[in-house]
Amino acid sequence: MKHLKLYHIPIAYMLVYVIAILATGVWLFLLSQGLGSSDIMQILTQIAMKTEPKSLHNFIEVATPHIFAMGILIFVVAHFMLFSTKVSQKFSLRVSVLLLIVALLNILAYLLIIFGVVVSGWVKLLSLELFVLLFLLLLGMVAFSL
Amino acid sequence: MKFLVTKDLQHSTLLGNLMAGVSVALFFYLGLDVVLHAYVIGSDMVSITNTLYGNVEEFIEPILIDTLLLQVHIDLFMSLFSIMIIASIYIRLYSDKRVTKWLVHTLFILGLLAPLSLMVAYFTSIGFVYVWLVSFSLGHLLGMGMSLLIVKKLLFK
C-alpha cells in the first residue's frame, strides 16, 4: 500500500513523545521524594534506604490512572512490532511481557511498602529503573524496525 | 492502527463509521481541552503569568512545580493518543495529497512543543509563554480541522 510509508511519521513521533512521558514521570517521582530540597544522589540513597511515606489513599490516587496508562502505552508501542521484519516476534513478545510485569511491579511496589512487606524502597527504585530501561529497549526496537 | 491500515474501507461501512465517530469525539475533546487549560493555566497573558510566576501585589502564589509537571505529564499522554488517532485516520484517507505529510509533521511538532514550552516558560522567561500560547492554540485548531476533514470525507462523499 502506497500510504504505508507515511505511517512511519506518527510512529517516529510516538517514540519521542513516550521518551518525554517517561522523563516527566521519573522527574515527578523524584520530586515527590524531595528532589527540590536535596541533590539527586542523596535522593536515590534516601529512596533505597527509606522512601517517603504514602497513605493508601495516596497510593490508589497514583496507581489507578497509571495502571490504565502504562498498560495501554505498552500495548500501543509493542503492537508496532507486529509489522517488524527486523526483530523476531519471539523476542518482541518476551520484552513486551517482561515490560508489563515490571510496570505492574513498579506500580504495586508502594503497596508492599505500605503494608510493611518491605521496609526500604529498593523495590520501587529497582522496578522503576528496570521499567525505564526495558521501555527504552522496546522503543529502540520499534525505531530499528522503521 | 493495524486495522486502520489493513481493512478496506470500500467494503467496511462499520470501520468507516467508527472512524467518523472517533473523529467527532476527538473534535469535541480538543475543544474542551482548550477550555480546561483556560481554567487551569489561564486564558490571557495576565492570568497565565499570574499562574506561572504568581503576583506579589495580588498575593497570588506561583503554581507548584509538582502541579505543573503533572499537568504536562498528562498533556503529553493525552496529546500522543489524540494526535496518533487523528494522524493515522487522516493518512488513511488523504495519503494521495502532498500536504498530508506536512500537516502530520506540524500536528505532532505543535503537540510536543506546547507542553515543553510551558515547562521552559516556568523556569525561564515570559517569552516562552507566547510560544506555548501559539503552539497550543494552533495545534488544537489544526487537530480540530483535520478531524472535520476526516468526517467530511467519510460521511459526505
Image: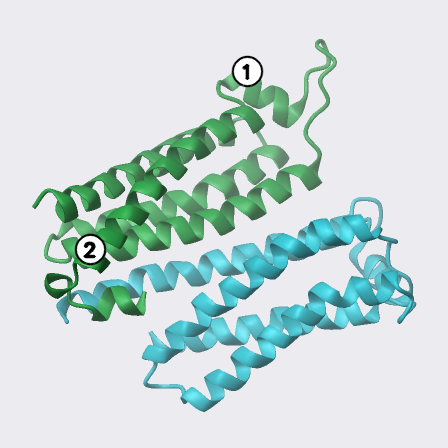
Left or right, B53 with respect to A58, comes to: left
Chain-order first, disc 1 or disc 2: 2
- The residue at 91%/66% (across/down) is A116
Q: Nearer the viewer, mark 1 or mark 2?
A: 2
Q: Colour of chain B?
A: green
Q: Secondary structure at mark 1?
A: helix
Per the image, the residue denoted by label 1 is B46
Give percent across and percent down for residue B49: 58, 22
Give percent across and percent down for residue A22: 58, 59
Chain seen in cyan = A
Decide: is A38 above or below B43.
Answer: below
Q: Amino acid at mark 1?
A: Val
Quadrant in which residue A29 is drawn: bottom right
Give percent across and percent down for residue A105: 71, 71
Q: Amino acid at mark 2?
A: Gly
Q: Do we see residue A66 in this rendering?
A: yes
Decide: is B73 above or below B40.
Answer: below
In the depicted view, which residue is nearer to us: B10 or A92?
Answer: B10
Per the image, the residue denoted by label 2 is B16
Query: Dot 1, how many residues are within 10 Å of its Cα: few (below 14), some (14-19), or many (20+)?
Result: few
Chain under callout 1: B
- The residue at 39%/37% (across/down) is B30
